[in-house]
């Protein structure tokens, strides 16, 4: 009989961290009491977020109905994936509204006792659920942005857009790119006005932390994608987050209404999400975008896709939404692709604006040299040896004669006579 002083929870944590197989990790977490791995919950959650899409696509044998049901809904990385999983598990709409953060045990018990909940209580519950979803979306955006920056670091000195978006049409768009300039320069460029180039910008209303802008992105074939957006600038520590939302039609100024007239080769679109600008290695900036790009139909006050906030939490599908969906469906495939790719082009223009790879290379070299450890100072014996070797080298050059027959050998051999002594040198 063998005994061990190791606690059960320590064994669970050790197996999760040391084993590489997903099936084993799942067995030592979701098939065990959460008290065993509560201290590493963030590690478990990060593991699920990084692998959920792969599991859904590959459908490994261990990832069966029983195991999926044990994984908390709020560990699933994207809003769309969470909604699909709720439907797959057969949760009702009321169950979906009452998230784990909002519905307490007491509230759940009261709902069972009194199924005819007054309308005021129902609205309050929906409001709480919307607030909780908004908070959860914000936390999800932060985690996704951090993941993108880690991916940029792992990618190394490679230029171009990095995308972490999933294949589903309604999934959240995740882009990242490195700019060869500090964050403040990039922010000033984004907020500046420009009437020329592929990425044209015009501010219509400016305050200290908010501004209404018109962005135009020229695509291949002469198609121009137009955005009328509200930017909310939120600086924190050494990074800046720009919250981007479409402007509602009733809030447009006269100048913006004039700009709202559609030209023959222009398409209206909206951006909803967050663009974060953070310092990156060697004086660069990392730009990460988490959100959505969608077509905007005439008369649409708001977009009918992922939006953080209470409106999304309490809104219901309406006849107007169905009309918007129909209008979007009538767009040609080429136009839909142009709208989808417009943000890629926009971020690509920001990258091109500050592109200076030679300067970044010099910064990398300097950083490498500065980090090299300094060699210790030579001792007096070592310095004396170098002096003697110098004298020997001079004597070899002045007096040494190559030994006959050694010209083509691998080792050079020299001899000379000095003061009755014969000296030899090999090199």
Image (tube, rainbow, N blue to C red):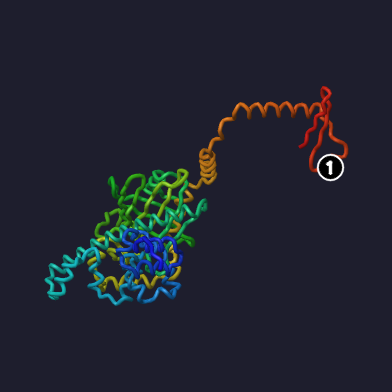
Taking the image as shown, residue 291 lies to the left or right of residue 157, namely: left
Taking the image as shown, residue 316 lies to the left or right of residue 377, namely: left
In the rendered view, would you say 404 is above or below 327? Answer: above
> Which quadrant: the N terminus?
bottom left
Q: Within 10 Å of the Cα at label 1, are there few (<14), some (14-19), or many (20+) other Cα atoms?
A: few
Q: Residue 25: x, y in percent?
A: 41, 66
Observer able to see residue 361: yes
Outermost residue toward the top? 419
Q: Which residue is mark 1?
A: 408
**403 or 292: nearer the viewer:** 403
Outermost residue toward the front? 1
Outermost residue toward the right? 404
Q: Residue 10: x, y in percent?
A: 36, 60
Observer able to see residue 339: no
Q: Residue at x 78, y 36 (%)?
A: 426
Q: Quadrant of residue 165?
A: bottom left
**381 or 358: nearer the viewer:** 381
> Which quadrant: the C terminus?
top right
Q: Residue at x 71, y 29 (%)?
A: 389
> SS of the residue at dot 1?
loop
Q: Residue 188: x, y in percent?
A: 38, 45
In the rendered view, would you say 368 is above or below 12? Answer: above
Q: Residue at x 23, y 68 (%)?
A: 98
Question: Number of callouts in the render?
Answer: 1
**207 or 117: nearer the viewer:** 117
Q: Residue 23: x, y in percent?
A: 42, 70
């Amino acid at each position: 009989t063998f005994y061990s002083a190791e606690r059960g929870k320590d064994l669970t944590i050790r197996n999760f961290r040391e084993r590489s197989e997903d099936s084993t990790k799942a067995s030592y977490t979701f098939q065990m009491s959460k008290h065993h791995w509560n201290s590493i919950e963030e590690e478990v959650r990060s593991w699920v977020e990084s692998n959920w899409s792969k599991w859904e696509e590959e459908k490994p044998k261990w990832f069966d109905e029983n195991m999926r049901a044990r994984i908390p809904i709020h560990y699933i990385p994207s809003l769309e994936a969470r909604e699909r999983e709720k439907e797959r598990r057969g949760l009702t709409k009321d169950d979906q509204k009452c998230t784990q953060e909002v519905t307490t045990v007491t509230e759940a018990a009261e709902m069972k006792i009194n199924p005819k909940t007054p309308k005021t209580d129902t609205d309050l519950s929906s409001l709480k659920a919307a607030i909780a979803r908004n908070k959860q979306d914000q936390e999800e955006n932060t985690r996704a942005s951090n993941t993108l920056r880690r991916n940029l670091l792992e990618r190394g000195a490679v230029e171009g857009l990095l995308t972490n978006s999933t294949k589903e049409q309604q999934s959240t768009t995740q882009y990242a790119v490195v700019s060869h300039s500090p964050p403040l320069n990039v922010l000033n460029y984004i907020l500046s006005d420009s009437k020329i180039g592929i990425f044209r910008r015009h501010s219509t209303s400016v305050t200290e932390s908010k501004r209404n802008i018109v962005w135009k992105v020229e695509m291949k074939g002469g198609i121009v994608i137009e955005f009328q957006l509200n930017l909310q600038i939120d600086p924190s520590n050494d990074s800046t987050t720009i919250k981007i939302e479409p402007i509602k039609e009733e809030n447009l100024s006269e100048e913006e209404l004039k700009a709202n007239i559609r030209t023959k080769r222009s398409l209206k679109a909206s951006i909803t999400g967050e663009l974060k600008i953070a310092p990156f290695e060697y004086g660069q900036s990392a730009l990460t975008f988490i959100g959505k790009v969608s077509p905007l139909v005439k008369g649409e006050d708001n977009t009918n896709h992922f939006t953080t906030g209470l409106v999304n939490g309490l809104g219901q599908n309406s006849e107007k939404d169905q009309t918007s969906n129909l209008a979007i469906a009538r767009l040609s495939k080429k136009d839909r692709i142009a709208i989808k790719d417009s943000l890629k082009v926009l971020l690509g223009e920001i990258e091109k604006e500050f592109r200076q790879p030679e300067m970044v290379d010099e910064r990398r070299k300097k950083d490498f040299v500065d980090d090299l450890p300094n060699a210790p100072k030579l001792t007096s014996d070592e310095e004396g040896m170098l002096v003697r070797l110098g004298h020997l080298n001079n004597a070899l050059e002045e007096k040494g004669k190559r030994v006959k027959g050694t010209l083509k050998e691998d080792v050079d051999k020299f001899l000379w006579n000095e003061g009755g002594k014969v000296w030899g040198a090999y090199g």
